[in-house]
Image (cartoon, rainbow, N blue to C red):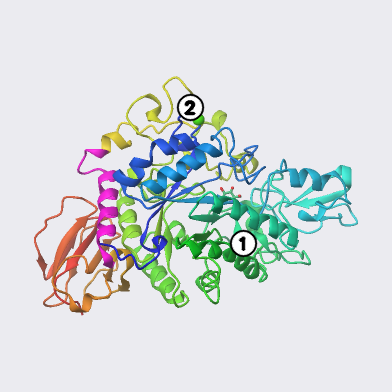
Amino acid sequence: MTSLSTPWWQHGVVYQVYPRSFRDANGDGIGDLAGVLEKLDYLATILGVDAIWLSPFYPSPMADFGYDVSDYVGVDPIFGDLATFDALVAAAHARGLKIIVDYVPSHTSDRHAWFQTSRASRGNPYRDWYVWRDPRPDGSPPNNWAATFGGSAWEWDAPTGQYYLHSYLPEQPDLNWRNPAVRAAMADVLRFWLDRGVDGFRMDALGRIMKDPLLRDNPPNPETVGHFHKELGEYDRQLHLNDQRHPDIHRAIRELRAVLDLYEADGRPRLAIGEIHIYDLAELGSYYGGALDELHLPFNFGLLKLLWAARAIREHVDAYEAALPPGAWPNYVLGNHDEARIATRLGPENAPLAMLLLLTLRGTPTLYYGDELGMEDVPVPPERRQDPWGKRVPGLNLGRDPERAPMPWSPVPNAGFCPPGVEPWLPITSNLARVNVQSQLDDPRSRLTLTRRLLALRKSSPALSTGSYRSVDWPGASDACYLFLREAGDAAANDGGVGKRLLVALNFSDASQRVTLPDGLRARPLLSTRLDHDQSDILGTLDLRPAEGLVLALLEPAT
Ligand code: NOJ
Ligand code: CA
């Protein structure tokens, strides 16, 4: 079994629940916390994940569906109340599941009492909790910063004659993290949820909390957009050097981390995950902190953004492993509420390989709800569009509704997400007959079966959950394949038992590929993305079918 000497967040698997879309328990067409509570057995026992990350459920006008928080220490009535949240934590913990909540430090809702006071007059004590500036002499915004969600990052406030900064929507004014009172109040928010028993935080848009103190313009971006992220329009026409990730950010993150560390005196490790979109691996590594005293896991979005090819993925993993500071633990993300679903992005034929990769790499995996079923993006007709990003930047297809469709539980009207006859907040998948939990549960070839078996294998194998990683080059291996070894600490004294020394073989092409194993190496297939592999030992050559991934136990030492 998995070594318990590592903290849970290293050997565990994180599953993201987008509460609006998971399960609607009270029948208003919107998912809620009571719905998550109903599905804990699915998550803990049937699927077998270790932690749930809940996207925001706090009181919010829902301009950005909860990422615009109007009260950090409550529950929006749409989602339930604090008593339901407490019941959810207790029930999750009773099943061995950890609860990670979203923490939105970079901005509040414009309806938050802090901002309401801040905007009421220039002289009030909350004015400096946000970033207010005079216009330039011609009346234009103080600098050229662009908002991620389109337009200038500055909004004019006529009554007080100043602009305020918003990195996202105008309804999401940025907090001023250079103000110690803001930092203290936001540390209190962490304490509030830690006192209610949460096991960690996913910190939203964390890179935004420290900007250039002089608010200098961003320089223009000389490059056309690379493949790292979807094209964001005018936002991409500047280099975001001054509107985020000022070096002072590290001190601010250390302060947040110190709050979590104090709670660990009770022996329960707490987790700080940071959402910072960084594709330079050395810079990403810096967010663990010089003394591993910042984030436990700065999100690594490599798998979401890279070209789906053996060489590109292998180079990324190898470079990431090499760039990690000593003692830092890797992590990988396969999907989230901001990105096209993996089965849509790569095609359904490649999605099983992506899942096998995610669950066999060294590092904490984050799985997005529905991806365990092979769910695809669900098109949303214009009259039902919800995401403000899609509405504000027409023409670029930036709306995130398709990846936020209701979780399909069973092949009935409204998919068991909400009662039949109620309109769910977003449309149900048209692939419901195939893509739903109930139908896939008893199907030995379903995507759910593959995910469950991968999760079970990962849990039972020290090599997969905590072992070392090494990619291998074996002569004759095709460029279309990526091969790596996972080995548990005492694998050198391999006693022939399976699970201590594993080979993961991935064929990224749509043709069959043959891999020649080094002389004398005997391998036993444990699990294939096809779920129908031959289980007899392999000596000599290993054949991989198109887009097949295979986990094998190595029964003789590899070279
Ligand atoms: C990142 C979140 O994942 C996204 O959904 C949100 O819109 C922005 N941060 C702003 O909070
Ligand atoms: Ca509901």
Q: Nearer the viewer, residue 282 or 197?
A: 197
List the residue tagged with mark 2. Answer: 26
Who is closer to the viewer here, 529 or 126?
126
Q: Is residue 440 left or right of residue 518?
A: right
- Residue 93: image x %, image y %? 41, 48
Looking at the image, which residue is at 22% across and 38% down? Answer: 442
- Residue furthest out toward the top: 421
Q: Is residue 462 magenta?
A: yes
Q: How many marks?
A: 2
- Judge depth for marks 2 and 1 and give the one in front: 2
Measure the alpha-carbon separation of dots 2 and 1: 37 Å
Task: Give the position of the C terminus as an image quadrant.
Answer: bottom left
Residue at image mark 1: 207
The amino acid on which the numbered mark 1 sits, given as a three-letter code, is Gly
Label 2 within 8 A of ligand 2 by Cβ: yes
Q: Using residue 402 as the reference point, say whether residue 491 is left or right of it.
A: left
Q: Which residues are magenta?
A: 441-463
